[in-house]
């Protein structure tokens, strides 16, 4: 059944240009340009060259460029992938050719990055405040690293006097992490910076600031 956004590029067709918001795209011919789609299937003899963003990629032909696969890259025995590759899962059949700089998909950071607490009090971090999601790793494998804490510190709920510099997403999910305001400071704000890292070492990028409003 063909759905909106689905397309078949026949073997006698060459497309030069961008494709965005695609569904399932099957390529027997050639696409030269950027492709953003849900599923991309490059059949034997087919070629895609450009910047590629897809959830699933199946390659029996040739793909070259900057490639990001959210879930599974399935490289068949006649397939060839060349370029800069980010992926979540990789399946390579005997004979498949992979010539790429391999990088896993980094975790994504969510949450409003804002807390509220009273002077000298502690407030628990929740997923609404700070959350990192990774397609490969569970919450216990995603580690936050804290830096530049201002007017307070992060700690485990059962040891609020002992600052910590790292904790997991599972710790947040279970309500184990709190921000403790330093009562010696009278300013209206506190906060800290944070980066999340997955088990393969990929990070959420530059440090993000979590602001703590002090009432």
Image (tube, rainbow, N blue to C red):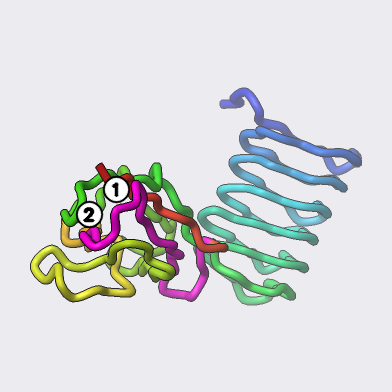
Q: Residues within 10 Å of mark 1 (few under 14, many from 20)?
A: some
Image vertical order of residue 156 relative to residue 12, above or below? below
* Residue situated in front as seen by the camera: 5 or 1: 5
Residue at 32% x, 45% y is 213
Say whether disc 1 or disc 2 marks the residue closer to the N-terminus.
1
x%, y% of residue 114?
36, 45
Image vertical order of residue 98 relative to residue 157, above or below? below
Q: Are marks 1 and 2 in contact (CB under 8 Å)?
A: yes
Residue at 69% x, 39% y is 25
Say left or right for 132 vs 77: left
Residue at 28% x, 46% y is 214
- The label shown at residue 156 is none
The boundaries of the magenta stretch are 180-204
The residue tagged 2 is: 173
The residue tagged 1 is: 127
Does the magenta portion include 176? no
| Helix, strand or loop status at disc 1 | loop
* Residue situated in front as seen by the camera: 68 or 164: 164
């Amino acid at each position: 059944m063909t759905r909106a956004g689905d397309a078949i590029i026949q073997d006698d067709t060459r497309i030069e240009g961008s494709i965005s918001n695609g569904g399932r795209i099957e390529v027997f011919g050639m696409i030269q340009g950027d492709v953003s789609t849900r599923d991309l299937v490059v059949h034997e003899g087919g070629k895609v060259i450009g910047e590629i963003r897809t959830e699933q990629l199946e390659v029996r032909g040739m793909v070259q460029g900057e490639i990001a696969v959210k879930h599974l890259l399935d490289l068949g025995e006649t397939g060839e992938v060349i370029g800069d590759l980010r992926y979540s899962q990789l399946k390579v059949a005997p004979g498949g050719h992979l010539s790429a700089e391999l990088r896993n998909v980094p975790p994504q950071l969510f949450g409003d990055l804002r807390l509220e607490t009273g002077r000298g009090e502690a407030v628990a971090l929740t997923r609404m405040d700070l959350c990192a999601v990774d397609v490969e790793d569970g919450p216990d494998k995603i580690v936050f690293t804290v830096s530049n804490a201002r007017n307070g510190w992060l700690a485990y709920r059962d040891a609020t006097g002992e600052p910590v510099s790292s904790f997991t997403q599972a710790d947040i999910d279970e309500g184990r992490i709190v921000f403790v305001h330093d009562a010696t400071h009278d300013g209206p704000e506190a906060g800290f910076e944070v980066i999340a890292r997955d088990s393969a070492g990929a990070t959420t990028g530059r440090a993000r600031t979590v602001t703590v409003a002090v009432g």
